[in-house]
Each structure stands twice: as C-alpha cells, then as structure tokens.
Image: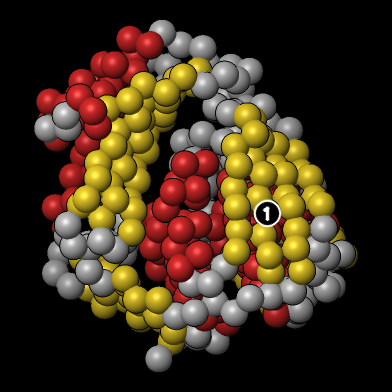
Amino acid sequence: MIEIDGSEGEGGGQILRTALALAIIRGEALHIRSIRAKRKRPGLLRQHLTAVQAAGAISGAKLTGDRLGSDELRFEPGAVRHGEHRFAVGTAGSATLVLQTVLWPLLVAPGESTVVVEGGTHNPLAPPFEFLDRVLLPVLRRMGAELELELLGAGFYPAGGGAVRLRVVGGRPLHPLVLDQRGAIRRRRAQAIIANLPATIARRELAVVREQLGFEHGELEVVMLTGPGPGNLLLIEGEHDGGTELVSHCGEKGVPAEQVGARAVAEWSRWHDAGVPVGEHLADQLLIPLALAGAGGFTTLAATEHTRTNAALVQRLLGVSIVIDPQGPVRARVSVGG
C-alpha cells in the first residue's frame, strides 16, 4: 500500500489529486492521512470529495473515509473503466481540478472516455477552463495525446453551476518534450470575462492592461458569458514560439476592477520579464505527463513550494528522476528522467 502524509511540503489538495491519479496508474492501494493539513479548513471539502469519488468511479475503487471533513482516506483501485462519466461537485468547487484528477489514468489506459464535471469553471486558486483549453491541452497534444475540451456552461465562484466536458482517447504513448526556449511572442490578447455584471467592470480592467502593458485596441476583448451567478475573470495571454502562456485573476466583491487588472499585469510581467516558456502553473501540470513519457524538461520561473511538493510525489510514485535546478533568482530548469 502506498503511504502518503498529506501534511508534507505544501500540504494542500494537489497531494491528494496526484496521489489518487498515480495510485490508479500503478494499480496499487493508497492510504493518505493528514489530508490538506496546512489549509484553514483541513480535510475533504466538497471539491476534494468529488475528486475522490470520480477517481473511484473510473477505477472501480474500494473507498474508506470518503466523506466531507475526513482527513484520512483508503483507496483501493481496480482497472480503469472507460466510457461515459458525469460528476457534480454540488458547489462552486473547481470542476477543472476534478477533471485533472481523472485525466492522467484515462490518458494512460487504452480506451475512449467522455467526462462531464459540473461545478465551478472560473475559480480563484484553480486553473480556469481557458487555461486547460489553450495552454495545457495543446502541450499534451504535442506529446501525442488525443483529447478535446468543451465549456458547456460557465460557473463562477461563488454560485458555480457550470460544466466542462472532456473527451480523451487513452493508451497512446506520450513522447518526451523539451520546452527551454520561449522565442518571440507572436500574438497577445487580454480578455475580461463577465457574467451578469456591468460591462464597465471589464473595460476598466482592460484599461489597466492597455496603460501598463501597451496592449493595442485589437488585443483587448470583453467577453460576456451567461451563468447562474455574477462573475468576472481577467485573462492575459501570449502565444510564443514555445507555446502559450495565460495568466488569470478573478474579480472579487469589494475589490476594484483596477486592482484586479494590476494583479494580473504583475503576474504577466513576472513571467514575461523572466523570458521563460513555461509559467508556474503549467510547470506543476507538466510533471506527470513528462514522467509518464519517461523524459523531458522545461525552463520556468523559480520553483514554488507547490511545484516542489508535486515533483517529490511524482518522482516517488512513478520512479522517474525530477531535478529542479535554480538558474538565478527568477528562473529554474526542471529535468525529468534521463
């Protein structure tokens, strides 16, 4: 049985999601304790419980401790079950994080699946739909994966009520990939997404991008979505020779649009000025597919505790070397395998 201490390193939900996915791939039972021990509300919240249940459903797992608030879980998976799957978070918890829990086992095992997850699609502290669709999935396709993602309905925090659908063809070997050079930024775009809110909020956010980053009028766009509740998300995106980077910041009640814009600009500038192809969020998500491919690497921003924690867990469970080599104060080179 794989034994995991959920309080190690960053001590958040990523440890749970990675452990579940890799336990299915290894076909071994998992015992994880101190789940999310370093969070203000430790244990399984609705989003994490849905991820556990989704992992259980696609693998026919036997579960013990799968209840709200539980800080300990036993998970005994069987073989991957491809087909039609539908999961509902039941709150505004992130649908994209639930999706990432089941993505890797479905990608490895031969077969085809369609997975629908209902919940939040545009959340703070979670990758929005657009990040998966425009940043992560294109990289996976370059590695040989066959998958498609669709936004069925927007769900902003705190109302939720959105849905995403993933189609994945599993069993195709993933190829190693190296992403070290960013090259020229060929195309820039800033989108202010709003639902059930005045368009002036979006225009004020985009004005910050225009003033501080010099984006031109044709690079700015207001996107109006429908959803069960109000919501706002600012995206700044750049297509470059090495792929695509996208930073996002959610609007919050009581936070001026100008402050939302300034936060997004600061994150974009930190990535842009470092001259790296891979942002800090993509860095987290590339560790598993590169380890499954057996080799690869990328240059990114200085590694966060989140990345270091995930790297240590992936290395332990998949037995593939992951080395994070700092390159000055703002950059790092991540080498997988080899």
* Quadrant position of residue 260: top left
Q: Which residue is mark 1?
A: 167
Helix, strand or loop at mark 1: strand
Residue 32 appears anywhere in the view: no
Query: Position of 135 compared to 24: left or right?
Result: left
Quadrant position of the C terminus in the picture: bottom left
Give the residue displayed 18% in from the left and 62% down from the top. 183
Residue 60 appears anywhere in the view: yes
Say if 115 sits above or below 231 in the image.
Answer: below
Q: Residue 228: horizontal and vertical position, in percent?
A: 63, 18
Q: Nearer the viewer, residue 285 or 308?
A: 285
Q: Residue 104: horizontal and vertical position, in percent?
A: 63, 66
- Amino acid type at circle 1 is Arg
Give the residue displayed 55% in from the left and 27% down from the top. 157
Q: Residue 192: horizontal and vertical position, in percent?
A: 36, 25
Give the residue displayed 70% in from the left and 37% down from the top. 118
Quadrant position of the N terminus in the picture: bottom right
* Quadrant position of residue 257: top left
Report the label total.
Answer: 1
* Quadrant position of residue 256: top left
Give the residue displayed 60% in from the left and 58% down from the top. 147
Query: Position of 32 compared to 139: left or right?
Result: right
